[in-house]
Image (cartoon, rainbow, N blue to C red):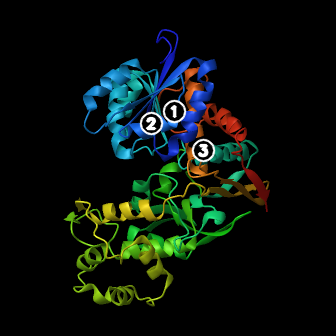
Amino acid sequence: MPLSASTTRQILLFGAGKSSTYLIEYLLQHAPKEKWHLTVVDYDIMAAREKIGRSFYATADAFDVKVATDALDMYLSKADIVISLLPPALHHIIAEHCIRFKKNLLTASYVDEEVKQLSPAIEQSGVLFLYEMGLDPGIDHMSAMKLIHSIQRKGGDILQFHSYCGGLVSPVSDDNPWSYKISWNPGNIVRAGKEGAVFKENGEVKQVAYEELFEWCGRHEVNIPGVGKLAYYPNRDSLRYLALYGLENIPNFKRATLRYPAFCEGWHALVKLGLTAESPSTSTDGVSYRQWLSNYLGMGNDEHLEEKLAEKLGIRPHARIMRQLRYLGWFDPTPINKGNLTPVQLLQSMIEEKLALKQADKDLVVMMHDIVFERKHIKTRLKSFLVLEGEDAMHTAMAKTVGLPLAIATRLILNGRINLKGLHIPVAPEIYQPVLKELEEYGIRFEESYD
């Protein structure tokens, strides 16, 4: 049971998924000294209980935000600070309640249009909403601003800012044709890139549509020290960070996602076939994966499905893409029997099963900032990079780099070391300096090279 509410600060966490492991462990580790209690709420009560173990300083509750919004009043009224690891579409529900109850809110998700519209109310309520406080977005912002501010203080003029980040499978656990395994929210994985991408190159704004994004990825590589060549695709709207980074006049600005080349090739095929589409929703009961795919693509009798599919994609029947599709199970005669699903929902269910991390698997987080700046008429190229390998399927590098920034910021806010109000992302020194310093104690540190 928790300590008396009169002597204990209450931390409320929504979500006990893949990214919560290190966040919860950090909060429980510091709970005795800091005198706080953690409540973890998740629709899967067993997942929440597994994460908190037998801790005296934590409680696990079953809760589904989508169907029990009225019950939020009970949770929010008792909380001193709130953290949300829920799917991004559900954050606005938590956010509106946090404004009403005047509670600080932290999340690793992007600032979206819904929370932007709440910005005046957040400011008026006098609380802090700290968004984009994970890995990417999160550590990317903090490490970038540390470099940018340092260069500018020394009189440097930044000409190029390229930032790359990827959650990958470690080479020691890479055993499938996709060269990929899931270390974060699978719903975000299957929908990645849907907004397309916008960035700046040689002073011109460039755009890449979703339909072209992963083909683009297959044609672009970057060399990461200690890792080697990786493919990348531009990530969302890079331009929205120009002003936030203080780089409005820079000619080259790009934020990008890293993948092994095999992934980009296979995912482009999925997009081309329409298998990431959000509609229509059709019944999967009594239908095999093979039949569903043949029907969806209008290929009639599925007897020669592989040959027809290879021809449609313009590849050889034994090409790697065909092995990737086969690995996911698209040609299986097994009945699906999962009710009504859209193509992307069916795809998500397949990758959750086939691309799951095994217990002893290790993931890999890779990040690099590639900055060109000029100082006293001398151009310098700076590369700052982070390479972090996970321990196993629960203690992943992804969970560590998403969860620890949130946990550290929570402690700093509760202890009065971060006093910002309103809607923020972690680009202010008040946030990034102490968080980056403590992250180094957990092995999350950047190395630098100069050309």
Q: Residues within 10 Å of mark 1 (few under 14, many from 20)?
A: many
Left or right: 168 with respect to 192? right
Q: How many marks?
A: 3
Q: Please, what is the three-letter code of the amino acid marked with disc 3?
A: Lys
Q: Earlier in the sequence, mark 3 or mark 2?
A: 2
User: Is any part of residue 217 visible from this angle?
Assistant: no
Instruction: Please name the residue that numbered disc 3 is placed on.
Output: 400
Instruction: Please name the residue that numbered disc 1 is placed on.
Output: 52
Q: Mark 3 or mark 2: which is in front?
A: 2
User: Is any part of residue 415 visible from this angle?
Assistant: yes
Residue at 39% from the left image edge and 87% from the top image edge: 310
Decide which of 390, 76 is in the foreground and name it. Answer: 390
Point out residue 389 in the picture as x, y percentages from the top left corner: 66, 54
Q: Please, what is the three-letter code of the amino acid marked with disc 1?
A: Ile
For the residues marked 2 and 1, what is the alpha-carbon distance in whole angstroms? 6 Å
Residue 268 location, quadrant = bottom left
Residue at 36% from the left image edge and 24% from the top image edge: 75
Residue 193 location, quadrant = bottom left
Q: Residues within 10 Å of mark 2 (few under 14, many from 20)?
A: many
SS type, badge 2 = helix
SS type, badge 1 = helix
